[in-house]
């Protein structure tokens, strides 16, 4: 009782002094964050904005300038209330239902609209827009045909803005943040709360005053979604970080080192005395572990395996043509000067050994299918030729063609559900629709009776993971290898000022029993990862284990 009296007394004193939550001084970051939230909300919810020909980008930049000299929370809320009311009365539009299926909605977050610090009139206005929200055909988003992932439309790329002004840099942040807020099915899976990403990144974008720092800000922002589909290309269509000088080799990145796995140009690699199996320990006196930690934090990836996969393409790229590197070979570490080259100078050509046939017999009783090469028209011929095999190995350590339904319809003995998905509800942004489980099979003839072995690793992503899930649902099937990329589902493309292109996973994909795949990926039944010694000897240790299991000599 005493504590309650004390609180009431303090509140009374503050009120006598003229203090209210709305009289607080508001920071630049908080003002901009509120603008981003309201601007994005109106873009996808307000029936006039979502259906009209508004230049909504221009509205953002105008509003950003309009709130520049506002100092208190009350002034800010009143300004936003006046702005929203100027767009028209939404009550004339039909009232929409607010119920949704909780079984497939994990992203619901409208708490900022009911925050006690918000001016009550503003909160009521925002909630009224939810009730009378835009439905049907919209200006800025529509469902992709067939799959239903969000397709963002009428987004200006601002190609001529090599160094966007501050308001357009913040527009890029607001645009991307809002798209993720309402249409990314895995927002709930990110390491960092999405609201806090907004407030953290506002000063980063505000201070990104040149091309390099702006690209860095975009890369940092996109890494926050923890999605292996979250790639970014610059205005030239090249991945950020790729147009730097690079070593003429491919790497496999481990937590504490980078190992050369392939020579991109044998002549210039030999000139630098670089060989497959060489271990890079440091560059310019900086340990590779530090490079991995710094650059890895800027990579959009669902899991650590994909961080290291993508690091292999940019880890030792840089602005200078020469580096000093500590390289270990056969237990001996030497310090050498290594030249770096442009991609054009390396002139990398895919070697013939990578262009393999789509299928072959590894032994008289084991068939092998290269899923990256197999075409749909080949499926019946290939599987028919393998009908007497004790085992068929499906190699999904690459990106497959759409062959999985032909394969599984051929192999399955009965109708089999293997995946279920959710898609964004374009008419209720931030909510998702539960789709029926996807199935294959309805076979009358006898199915294949042998073992089905699926090879996977961090290269197994998206369609490859979908394909893996389908094969794994077949009887007598196992997966061998390591964690997959953890990014299944069709992608949505996002265009940002400066003509940067970004992607995100657009559908939520789950096992029929509701187990998740995003970030987790497909877990192998038998874990095998290449070793340093194996790479030096050019061994495929995953395939070797699969052959042993197929022959019954390992498990």
Image: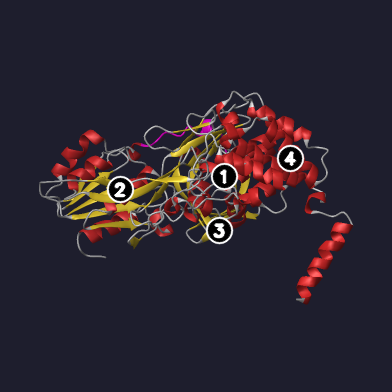
Give the spatial CA distance, label 3 vs label 2.
36 Å
Q: Earlier in the sequence, mark 1 or mark 4?
A: 1
Q: Which quadrant would residue 399 be assigned to in this image? A: top left
- Would residue 10 appear left or right of 528 to someone viewing this image? right
x, y percent for residue 296 = 57, 51
The circle drawn on residue 206 is 4
Q: Position of residue 368 (x, y in %)?
A: 23, 47
- Looking at the image, which is closer to me, 48 or 295? 48
Q: Is residue 168 above or below residue 1?
A: above
Q: How many angstroms separate mark 4 from mark 2 (CA)?
A: 47 Å
Q: Is residue 78 magenta?
A: no
Front residue of 194/314: it is 194
- Mark-to-mark CA distance, 1 and 3: 49 Å
4 or 2: tag closer to the N-terminus: 4
Which quarter of the figure has residue 42? Answer: top right
Q: Residue at x 78, y 47 (%)?
A: 73
Q: Which residues are magenta?
A: 340-351
Q: Which-is-in-front pick, marks 1 and 2?
A: 1
**Alpha carbon separation for disc pair 1 and 4:** 21 Å
Q: Residues within 10 Å of mark 2 (few under 14, many from 20)?
A: many
Instruction: Give the residue pinned by disc 1.
Output: 181
Check contact, mark 4 vs mark 2: CB within 8 A.
no
Outermost residue to the right: 17
Q: In the rendering, which numbered label is found on residue 333?
A: 3
Closer mark to the observer between disc 4 and disc 2: 4
């Amino acid at each position: 009782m005493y504590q309650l009296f004390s609180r009431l007394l303090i509140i009374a004193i503050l009120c006598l002094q003229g203090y209210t939550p709305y009289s607080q001084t508001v920071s630049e970051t908080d003002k901009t964050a509120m603008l981003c939230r309201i601007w994005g909300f109106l873009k996808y919810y307000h029936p006039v904005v979502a259906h009209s020909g508004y230049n909504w980008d221009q509205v953002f930049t105008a509003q950003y300038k309009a709130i520049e000299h506002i100092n208190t929370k009350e002034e800010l809320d009143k300004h936003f209330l006046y702005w929203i009311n100027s767009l028209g009365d939404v009550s004339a539009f039909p009232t929409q239902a607010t119920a949704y299926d909780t079984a497939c909605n994990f992203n619901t977050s409208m708490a900022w609209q009911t925050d006690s610090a918000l001016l009550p009139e503003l909160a009521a206005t925002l909630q009224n827009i939810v009730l009378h929200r835009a439905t049907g055909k919209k200006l800025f988003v529509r469902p992709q045909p067939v799959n239903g992932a969000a397709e963002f439309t009428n987004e200006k790329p601002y190609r001529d803005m090599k160094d966007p002004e501050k308001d357009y840099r913040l527009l890029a942040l607001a645009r991307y943040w809002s798209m993720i807020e309402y249409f990314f099915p895995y927002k709930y899976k990110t390491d960092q709360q999405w609201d806090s990403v907004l407030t953290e990144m506002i000063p980063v974008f505000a201070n990104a005053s040149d091309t390099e720092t702006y690209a860095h800000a975009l890369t940092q922002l996109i890494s926050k979604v923890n999605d292996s589909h979250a790639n970014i290309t610059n205005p030239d269509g090249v991945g950020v970080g790729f147009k730097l000088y690079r070593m003429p080799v491919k790497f496999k990145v481990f937590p504490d080192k980078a190992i050369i796995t392939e020579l991109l140009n044998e002549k210039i690699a030999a000139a630098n005395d670089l060989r497959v199996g060489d271990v890079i320990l440091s560059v310019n006196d900086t340990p590779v572990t530090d490079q991995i930690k710094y650059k890895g934090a800027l990579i959009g990836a669902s899991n650590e395996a994909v961080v290291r996969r993508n690091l292999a393409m940019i880890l030792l790229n840089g602005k200078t043509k020469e580096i000093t590197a500590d390289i270990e070979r056969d237990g001996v570490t030497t310090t050498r000067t290594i030249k770096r080259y442009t991609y054009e100078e390396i002139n990398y050509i895919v070697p013939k050994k990578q262009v393999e046939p789509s299928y072959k017999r590894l032994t008289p009783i084991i068939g092998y299918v290269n899923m990256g090469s197999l075409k749909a028209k080949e499926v019946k011929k290939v599987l028919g030729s393998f009908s007497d095999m004790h085992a068929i190995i499906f190699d999904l350590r690459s990106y497959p063609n759409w062959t999985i339904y032909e394969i599984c319809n051929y192999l399955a003995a009965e109708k089999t559900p293997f995946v279920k998905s959710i898609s964004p509800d374009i008419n209720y942004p931030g909510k998702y629709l539960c789709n029926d489980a996807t199935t294959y099979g309805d076979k009358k003839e006898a199915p294949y009776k042998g073992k089905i072995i699926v090879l996977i690793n961090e290269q197994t992503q998206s369609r490859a993971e979908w394909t893996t899930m389908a094969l794994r649902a077949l009887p007598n099937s196992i997966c061998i290898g390591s964690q997959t990329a953890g990014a299944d589902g069709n992608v949505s493309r996002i265009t940002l000022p400066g003509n940067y292109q970004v992607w995100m996973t657009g559908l939520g994909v789950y096992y029929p029993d509701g187990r998740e795949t995003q970030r987790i990926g497909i877990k192998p039944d038998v874990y095998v990862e290449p070793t340093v010694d194996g790479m030096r000897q050019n061994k495929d240790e995953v395939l070797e284990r699969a052959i042993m299991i197929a022959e019954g000599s390992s498990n």
